[in-house]
Image (cartoon, coloured by chain):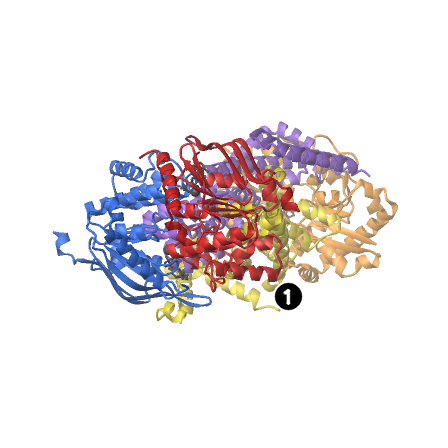
Chain colours: A purple, B orange, C yellow, D red, E blue
Amino acid sequence: MSALPIIAVWLGALALNTWLARFDTRATRLAVALIFGATILILWELAVRLYAIPAVILPAPSQIGASVAANTAILWTDFVQTILKGALTGWLIGAAAAIATAIAIDRSPFLQRGLLPIGNFVAALPIVGIAPILVMWFGFDWQSKAAVVVVMVFFPILVNMVAGLAATDPMQRDLMATWAAPYGASLWKLRLPAAMPFLFNGLKITTTLALIGAIVAEFFGSPTKGMGFRISTAVGRLDLPLVWAEILVAAIAGSLFYGIVALIEKKVTFWHPSQRRQRG
Amino acid sequence: QELTLQLKWVTQAQFAGYYVAKDKGFYEEEGLDVTILPGGPDIAPTQVLAGGGADVIVEWMPAALAAREKGLPLVNIAQPFKSSGMMLTCLKESGIADPKTDFKGKTLGVWFSGNEYPFLSWMSQLGLSTEGGPDGVTVLKQGFNVDPLLQKQAACISTMTYNEYGQVLDAGIAPEDLVTFKYEDQGVATLEDGLYVLESTLEDKAKVTDLVRFVRASMKGWKYAEENPEEAAQIVLDNDETGAQTLDHQVRMVTEIGKLTAGSNGVLDEADYQRTVDTLMAGGSDPVISKAPEGAFTHVITDRAFD
Amino acid sequence: MTDAAAGGGVNPTLRGVLPILTVLLAIVVIWYGAAVWMNAPWVRDQAARAETLLTTGDLIRQTLTLERPVLPAPHQVAAGLWEGIAGQKITSKRSLVWHGWVTLSATLAGFAIGTVAGILLAVGIVHNRAMDQSVMPWAVASQTVPILAIAPMVIVVFASAGITSLLPKAIIAAWLSFFPVLVGMVKGLRTPDAMQLDLMHSWNASRAQQFWRLRLPSSLPYLFASLKVAIAAALVGTIVGELPAGATAGLGARLLSGSYYGQTVQIWSALFAAAILAAVLVMLIGALERMTLRRMGLAR
Amino acid sequence: MQVARRSETAIAAKSISLTFPTADGPVHALKDISLAINRGDFVSFIGPSGCGKTTFLRTIAALETPTGGTLSVNGMTPDAARKARAYGYVFQAPGLYPWRTIAGNISLPLEIMGFSRSDRAQRIARVLDLVDLTGFGGKYPWQLSGGMQQRASIARALAFDADILLMDEPFGALDEIVRDRLNEALLDLWKKTGKTIGFVTHSIPEAVYLSTKIVVMSPRPGRITRVIDSPLPRERPLEIRDTPEFIALAQQVREGLREGHSYD
Amino acid sequence: MQVARRSETAIAAKSISLTFPTADGPVHALKDISLAINRGDFVSFIGPSGCGKTTFLRTIAALETPTGGTLSVNGMTPDAARKARAYGYVFQAPGLYPWRTIAGNISLPLEIMGFSRSDRAQRIARVLDLVDLTGFGGKYPWQLSGGMQQRASIARALAFDADILLMDEPFGALDEIVRDRLNEALLDLWKKTGKTIGFVTHSIPEAVYLSTKIVVMSPRPGRITRVIDSPLPRERPLEIRDTPEFIALAQQVREGLREGHSYD
Ligand SMILES: Nc1ncnc2c1ncn2[C@@H]1O[C@H](COP(=O)(O)OP(=O)(O)OP(=O)(O)O)[C@@H](O)[C@H]1O
Ligand SMILES: Nc1ncnc2c1ncn2[C@@H]1O[C@H](COP(=O)(O)OP(=O)(O)OP(=O)(O)O)[C@@H](O)[C@H]1O
Ligand SMILES: Cc1ncc(C[n+]2csc(CCO)c2C)c(N)n1
Ligand SMILES: [Mg+2]
Ligand SMILES: [Mg+2]
């Protein structure tokens, strides 16, 4: 019975969005995404209130909002520590390492056969296992978090990059051969451009992995700031609205991060069919 | 009658009493079917209790009182641990001899997740800032083990007399090379490992009877463990699903735990309670609790259990 | 006939294994060096505390045999692994096979849920404009929620509903693994070129026909690359899910309890067991990929 | 009967224009194209490269939406005609699906349109024979030569009985002899079925030999410069190419073409 | 001087055969091909679709390795010649790089071969004009028509001065007028530079008009059935196509072709 308002809101929003999506302008696109989000928030608020879910299990969005407003300074410090220092640095280093490795592997069939299986293996080491070790090695501050992120993002980017470097069209390769293009030239001018759609696939997936890695690594030791630190201590104090405020910041930062990478992708791989407005 | 107990930490001799009571059939004798859920670093037992995942939890009083202020009405029904096992363990070579003068500028490892309150109030008593700098201390959120001390990433780390301290020794550092500061000695000890339930549970007559039986059987377990450390350790080992513990370590832990439970028959000593509340209210710029709690404990259960 | 042409005299198995062995050997050598280097400070400290003198030989011997090394030597890990895998009855709580199985079953369940969810969402996004515009940003946001933070809540919520063991862990695994599948599939499903789509269009193929006969086949290379990432992610998710489930069974619990008690070798053995598991799973998907692509005539 | 009631005009274009927006300004691909094609016509489009032939064919098939003008096909919108599966389309490049064999590629539209398995097998065999690819059904596209791929794509469009056949330079990659053979086969098919055919070619003799109507286009922007109705009879042996009528017609087309070539 | 010392034979093939292994048995694409091409020859290859023209051209360019026989190019192995950048190759399909504009595509081999920036710009402008694509340098391949793409790919192969030009049906997608123009331009280039040219076509007049040597091939397995040396002078105005010599030559080629067509 009490599910009625929830279903009503949901159906209403669904109808509104389906209608809006038909226009497909920049404004409606934004509106659709926002309405979708707003709907989830409203449903959440409704559910918490209707079913009287205790705040220590799941706080309502309104409580989370209040907590964000009250803790801006803390949230900012944590953001800088975890995302800017830990996640971003680690992601950049990890991506660079993966791309370099992919190229090295691509060049040498020997390395490809030797490194790829072992690379799979090393990179599949679960974070929760390596985080304590890396904290032990690199200390408590953000460096160890960046190290965790490096290890986490390496494999997905590597796999995609290797697939991408192999994804050239036979005729395009033959052309390079007729010009006797040296390895460097066919790498720069054929394989790398052709690999970009795959590479960005990997880069996009790992933006979110980087955040998770940096935050989770803080559970295993950290200075007294950072999003992971705050989340674990706040859970201990049952300050769930603060926990969710941090989660909210993480979600916004992650979406932005993803969005920026997607935007760069659009610029770089404008020629790929998935980015082009199809003929017709 | 079914009852679920949520522990504060992983299966280890810290909870020997409960495992002994279960294995030796003390619960069964009382007509109880007790499920013991091990905890872990990410488990907030208070949250499990609020979510209905457990009937009784083992929790430290600072965390319990903090939760109470957050609106989760926890009540202490029994206190098997008389004294605190928490201490700060430092390498002698770090040059720390006296807390009043030597902590300045040092890095200290502290457990968070609700266990940081006694430390914070200690530091505020010493007049030390916990924000780092030459006149304060740098605080690290310590992980789950004693590596920061062994790797010299911190001058001192938090240890429990019964567990982490032993691990430091096991690692090969002699007691002579260490300096320890027990919270008991520093006058900032708070009550650990009490049994807590929700207020609403106490309103249920049948449940109260179960709890009475549970506490009685648990205390019987604790006393049995005190007297038979080897057997208790073996029982704990049998209950550890990860197969990670070693018998030696658990025997030592039972022995050390025995020292903490020794002074308690399960009844909460109101003087200890008051001291804990005072310590927490004094705590630094960010006091854990802002006003003295009301009704945070009850003697109803223990009175009926040990009558 | 073909083999003779390609073989070039060298035994083909040897050709496959030789590079791996070479790289492996290099890693082991570097590893030993690192172990000596990283464990040396502790050994020196201990010697200083005991006021004994240390020869280089002693130093090396001791760094490679420590009980709680900073970095255990390869043979220590190997011994730990061997002990965990072959030294126990597989039903024993100390057996890595037993813990590995606990983890594997949840991983596979989570991977299955995640893959299905990822593919379904991708199909929705590619075919439904409203979904395209609304789901993706929130799917991204979902991945930025630190799972380790909400994992306990998931476990708590499920536990209060009386569901324990495999499912909560599998859900967390699925949570992590659906995303790579989603991203890869959306890209893959949009990969067919204009002419291929136009043809379908001119035949007035239904969306389902377009999906099964064009979009799906051309998305497979992307899908498989994503699946490899997803299965590794599912394993990570399961292990994360095993932490707050209380230190019970599974490689994650094994890892963490090793960590509580400072048993470095146990951590590394569990870690390697997990990594071996992941590598095997990834290789299985790779084999599936080759098989599929060959059957589709795409492997040239 | 169905056929009798439908309008005689199969394709009616009125002042069609089409502009592609590109980064450096709009490209006017079609401008003010008006054309009526009757049911059963064989219309060839000829004109210099880049003049908009492909674009116009695509517009007819509802693969491109005109930015101006109106277009009706079989009395419906092009899109409705598409939904009624009125079109068989042969693209300028083969466009075979690489994960399907040649037979699989031909089978694809048949599967989509719900032909039975046995019917499919029979049709595949028939069209493979028509384009002289019998025995290559099991090969993958990249195992065939360029001309063979092109023939496979023609076979694919002929396998189902579309009302309107649109072919974009289908015989460009074929030698004279095969081309002649296929030209005859196509004429044969056209006569037997009364299909409406739109055909892009660069070969003047081919256009004249096949068509009932020849549309000459000129580029930048794409316009129609001449529409020539062929006086040739429906029955056309290959030798008709040596008749004076044929040669005169070809000359007419050549002139039209030359006019359009801006750089002459 | 370098040139003087090199052998007069540019390409020498002795009993070349090439077999593709496929799932359903080997395909004999070339069988026992022997041919000598002199420096400065213009050789056309003509033959039914699938007879192995592309395969032979690829073999010359070291893109395919013969399974039998020997092949030497400029007195070296084909691979050494490739490394010495002896080849300009126009593939049967345009094969443009989608992430580069037309100008960027033409520039690519020039960049690889280390031409200076200004030299590149000049060459690009020249060849774009040659194929009548001036003004389209900034467009991306997918924004061009099929014929324009093909012309861009021809421009790309002409932009650098390869010793040997291999062209696989370069003018297939072009109309008669552009084709004539490009034929003349190609002849002009050939006369001026003395390049050796290998040229695949399906048009008999085109082959006769351009070549000094016409190689007629027949399929399954791909063999050479006739090699016709052209008596036509090097200087060839378009009108030469109406001379009796020309027509006789064309007839000769047509016969050779017909012989090879198994299904006639
Ligand atoms: N990669 C391959 N695998 C198997 N068979 C192939 C392959 N490439 C070509 N063939 C076969 O070799 C034969 C010759 O092909 P080729 O491309 O050389 O023909 P072509 O003379 O260029 O024909 P077209 O005029 O149609 O382009 C064909 O029968 C073709 O099926
Ligand atoms: N997607 C597009 N974006 C921008 N311009 C385009 C696009 N498609 C085609 N054009 C332009 O439209 C014009 C007409 O192209 P179309 O493909 O119709 O020519 P065509 O007559 O078929 O030529 P060809 O004989 O070479 O195939 C050309 O100038 C081309 O550059
Ligand atoms: C994240 C986290 N760190 C430390 C503790 C403190 N603690 C309470 S009981 C116990 C077991 C001692 O062996 C420990 C370490 C905690 N609860 N959670
Ligand atoms: Mg065209
Ligand atoms: Mg060919």
Q: Residue at x 52, y 51 (%)?
A: D191
Q: Is residue D247 found left or right of B80 in the rendered image?
A: left
Q: Chain letter of disc 1?
A: C
x, y (%) of residue D200? 44, 44
Any part of residue C254 in sight: yes
Of all residues shown, which one is farthest toward the top? A69
x, y (%) of residue A177? 32, 53
Question: Dot 1: few (<14), some (14–19), or many (≥20) neighbours within 10 Å?
Answer: some
Query: Residue B15, relative to residue E174: is it above or below?
Result: below
In terms of image quadrants, where is residue C186?
Answer: top right
Query: What residue is shown with label 1?
Result: C92
Query: How many marks are shown on the rendered structure?
Result: 1
Look at label 1 and name its amino acid. Answer: Ser
Any part of residue C279 in sight: no
x, y (%) of residue A265? 47, 39
Q: Is residue C189 found left or right of E141 in the rendered image?
A: right
Q: Is residue E247 found left or right of D245 in the rendered image?
A: left
x, y (%) of residue B92? 50, 46
Q: Nearer the viewer, residue B293 or B273?
A: B293
Q: Find ligand 5 in the image and state its quadrant.
A: bottom left
Q: Residue at x 57, y 68 (%)?
A: C87
Q: Nearer the viewer, residue E2 or D115?
A: D115
Q: Secondary structure at mark 1?
A: loop
Q: Is residue A179 found left or right of A61 in the rendered image?
A: left
In terms of image quadrants, where is residue A236?
Answer: top right
Of all residues shown, which one is farthest toward the right? B205
Q: Nearer the viewer, residue A116 or C198?
A: C198
